[in-house]
Amino acid sequence: MTDTIPYIIERKLEAVEIRQYPDIVLAVVENNVDDTGFSLLFDYISGENTTRSRIPMTTPVISSEKIKMTAPVITGKTSMAFVLPSSYTMQTAPLPTNPSVHLVQQPKRRIAVLRFSGKTTQESVQKYTAELMAVLKTKGVAVTGESLLMRYNSPFTPGFLRRNEVAVEIIE
């Protein structure tokens, strides 16, 4: 079974959960196009690192995207990240040997999250991101940073069984 980042649900705003996430260490690939970063990150946790250690897979796999709310496409700089198990810190995590992969410390933060199932197409991500942002705007919750796509299942999982979430950091 794959570990999932622990979080605390602080409250709900309609279908949106406001969550508190702890400090985490991420393995990140920038300029991820069509999920090409997945294989680089998988290589890192499979032993392409300075200690040749296998690192357990955790969920979710996080993608950041800049979404133009007035256009039908996802554009701009993107990244894909694997969350390292909580037993790792920036000091204890093996360094990647591939220069395309780097480690990042993500401090504790509050995230607004909207869950959905199915395949994560550009259209579905845009639709649910717009829904998330609309709820937050209606409730007067300020956001910061880029929207995130968090995927919890293997690409071989049937769409209707997949757990996906769109999220954004909030300021309160």
Image (spheres, rainbow, N blue to C red):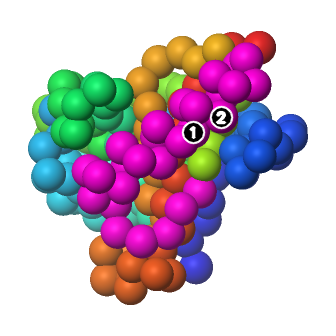
The secondary structure making up most of the magenta span is helix
Tell me the number on the disc at residue 101. none
- Magenta span covers which residues? 115-141
State which quadrant residue 26 falls in: top left
Q: Could you classify mark 2 by the number of other residues whose Cα lies within 10 Å: few (under 14), some (14-19), or many (20 or more)? A: some
Cβ atoms at labels 2 and 1 below 8 Å apart: yes
Secondary structure under the numbered disc 1 in the rendered image: helix
Compared across the picture, whether 32 is left or right of 131 comes to: left
**Depth check, front residue: 92 or 128:** 128
Horizontal and vertical percent position of residue 68: 28, 26
Three-letter code for the amino acid on which mark 1 is drawn: Leu
Residue 123 makes an appearance in the image: yes
Q: Residues within 10 Å of mark 1 (few under 14, many from 20)?
A: many
Say if the magenta span includes residue 41.
Answer: no
Q: Secondary structure at mark 2?
A: helix
Left or right of residue 69, residue 16 in this image = right
Using the rendered view, name the quadrant where residue 50 is placed: top left
Q: Position of residue 165 (x, y in %)?
A: 53, 53
Q: Which amino acid is tagged 2?
A: Val
Q: Position of residue 143 (x, y in %)?
A: 59, 18
Query: Residue at (73%, 17%) from the top-left corner?
Result: 140
Which residue is denoted by mark 1 in the rendering? 132
Residue farthest right in this picture: 11
Above-or-below relation of 118 to 147: below
24 vs 43, left or right, is right
* Magenta segment includes 136: yes
Corner quadrant of residue 9? top right
Q: Is residue 40 visible?
A: no
Which residue position holds label 2?
Answer: 135
Q: Nearer the viewer, residue 30 or 104?
A: 30
